[in-house]
Amino acid sequence: MNTKAFLDYLEFERNYSSHTILAYSGDINDFFQFIAVLYGVEDAKDVVYSYVRAYVVHLSERDLTHRSINRKIASLKAYFKFLQKIGDVEISPLAKHKSLKIKKEIQIPFSQSEVNAVLQGLGEADDFKSIRDFTIITLFYATGMRRSELINLKLSDIDFSTGTVKVLGKRNKERLIPLINWLENILKKYLNVRSVSWGSVDLPYLLLTDKGDKLYETFVYRIINRYFSEASKKTKTSPHMLRHTFATHLLNNGADLNAVKELLGHASLAATQVYTHSSIAELGKVYKNAHPRNIKKQ
């Protein structure tokens, strides 16, 4: 297997994150361990599509979702496409593979009243932990940034003179997000209390844990889940739901889809369109209530 060259390609040419590269590596190794045991095959040149089909069945028997299986197979597709590119294989065994169908799940965002309930509960606090939590929630809701982007925000990324925050997104792509006045005021309040609490901490990162360290993923998840599980009955109360809420609320209030795409840092408009279902539902309510020929209008 020429996996090292492939992983180097992902890192240095495609600028993939270490987390993504680790996922690709795990998917490829898992597949080759499977075919080594079942077929005694270790060389990528000897892989045929029947091995891939058997692997898909194996994953299904492990109760993996279609989405998870498709992700693993996508890793293999990318790997064999790379091997084709460098001449290690002539034809990819996955050339004609079709992804498994995935049932579309509509994720309902937090309502404005749910978000307001959380923000109002934290808005009057003056201790470091509460103001830090308030700032995290506000950043998610006011910018739509990803959890990893928020964790890696640095003090130098906030520019009050231009009213922007610089975000390092997927594949190390930078984007600037405008700071609305509400968010600017909250950030300034947080920076004051951060300076008082951790002025001597030599860390470039904007947001800190209770111990003055850099944030980590589960820490941020626990914060969002704790506050929103109290304010909402929704089963999903993750940081991503706040990103989803940001996009949906913008669209509901008339924002242009392309503008939302740029704010979210999506590579394609198709990725942003998943957020339009809620705005269409909202538009439907307005339409039904406003149209004079709607006989069901109360």
Image: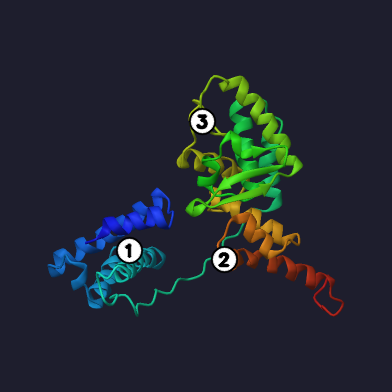
* Residue that lies at the very extreme toward the left in this rendered image: 40
Q: Residues within 10 Å of mark 3 (few under 14, many from 20)?
A: some
Amino acid type, label 2:
Ser
Q: Nearer the viewer, residue 50 or 289?
A: 50
Say which residue label 2 marks. Answer: 268
Residue at left offset 84%, top offset 71%: 290
The quarter in which the C terminus is drawn is: bottom right
First of labels 3, 1 by sequence position: 1
First of labels 3, 2 by sequence position: 3
**Rendered location of residue 59, percent (x, y):** 29, 66
Contact between marks 3 and 1 (CB within 8 A): the answer is no
**Rendered location of residue 180, percent (x, y):** 74, 44
Q: CA distance from mark 3 to mark 2?
A: 34 Å
The quarter in which the N terminus is drawn is: bottom left
Residue at left offset 68%, top offset 40%: 119
For discs 3 and 2, the disc positioned in front in the rendered view: 2
Say whether residue 54 is left or right of residue 206: left
Say which residue label 3 marks. Answer: 209
Q: CA distance from mark 2 to mark 1?
A: 31 Å
